[in-house]
Image (cartoon, helix red, strand yellow):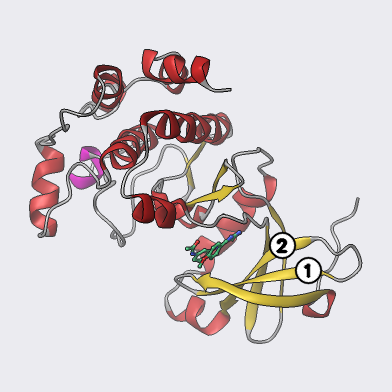
Amino acid sequence: NEPRIWTLQDFEIGKALGKGKFGHVYLAREKRTHYIVALKMLSKRQLLESRMERQLRREIEIQSHLKHPNILRLFGYFWDEKRIYLILEYAPNGELFNELRIERKFSEPKSANYIEQVINALMCLHENNIIHRDIKPENLLNSCGVIKISDFGWSVHAPTTRRKTLCGTLDYLPPEMVCREEYDEFIDHWALGVLTYEFLVGEPPFESREPRETYRRIEGLQYNVPSHISEEARDFISKLLKRNPYERMSLEEALEHPWLVKHRNSMV
Ligand SMILES: COc1ccc(/C=N/Nc2[nH]nc(C)c2C(=O)Nc2cccc(NC(C)=O)c2)cc1
């Protein structure tokens, strides 16, 4: 099916879902098929001012070609004189970040189930030689229990050396990014360890009041695992939060780790 030329007139705009960094996301319904989507509206001026247009092109290029149940679909895009519009898959339950703040922390079965889905998405990305580089609860959407990785704004084709200074949370940065070394897809493995910790504990492992302190704790691998965390979960995290990227567990090994196997067998 030929990609259509979409226009705003093809959609009925519903409620605002939320405000992203560069624009608003609205619930929308395609008029002909009544298909429900999330329409992300980005201001051209803001994109140009912050020189993000190259990053947006990359985001569109990457996300539009990826088809995986745990990766949020980008169905298409269009623009008018003021804005660029991304036609995105709608995930009814919203950001996992919100769910985690409400529940404070997730149970081990729930964390294992979510982490397994993130691993499946990362395997798809890495098979396509893509590093996400921004795995965190804010960039994970929940669609009736199915986790969708979204926001490919920071994704790149592996391996790469970072050109830009980093913005956003430092909590998820691996040591090799903190010390400006070359890095590759293993930075996503590190982020997976940080994500697992944050699901189980309710806050990221290296979180500190001062960014400098966060850097120091990341470089020194200084994190404490509360006693309520199971031995298997503790071991799973420790095999991802390794200073040397090549010592980090592979995604295949992670799927076979006792912590995930234990909870997979107990899932209905
Ligand atoms: C405020 O409560 C909410 C509950 C659920 C949603 C669902 N969002 N679902 C989405 N599907 N596809 C995309 C893209 C989105 C999306 O961007 N959501 C979004 C954007 C900005 C903030 C939030 N906030 C929360 C709490 O999820 C969600 C959005 C907001």
**Magenta residues?**
175-180
Q: Residue 57 location, x and y as percent? A: 59, 61
Q: Position of residue 253 (x, y in %)?
A: 42, 15
Q: Is residue 171 above or below residue 23?
A: above
Determine which residue is flagged by label 1.
29
State whether label 2 is within 8 Å of ligand 1.
yes
Residue at figure coordinates x 44%, y 34% from the top left: 110
On the rendered structure, is 231 left or right of 137?
Answer: left
| Amino acid at dot 1 | Arg
Mark 1 touching mark 2, by CB under 8 A? Answer: yes
Q: Is mark 1 on a helix, strand or loop?
A: strand
Describe the element under mark 2 as helix, strand or loop: strand
Q: Hey, which quadrant is residue 210 in on the image?
A: bottom left
| Distance (Cα) linking label 1 and label 2 | 6 Å
Q: Mark 2 points at which residue?
A: 37
Name the residue: 48% across, 30% down. Answer: 113
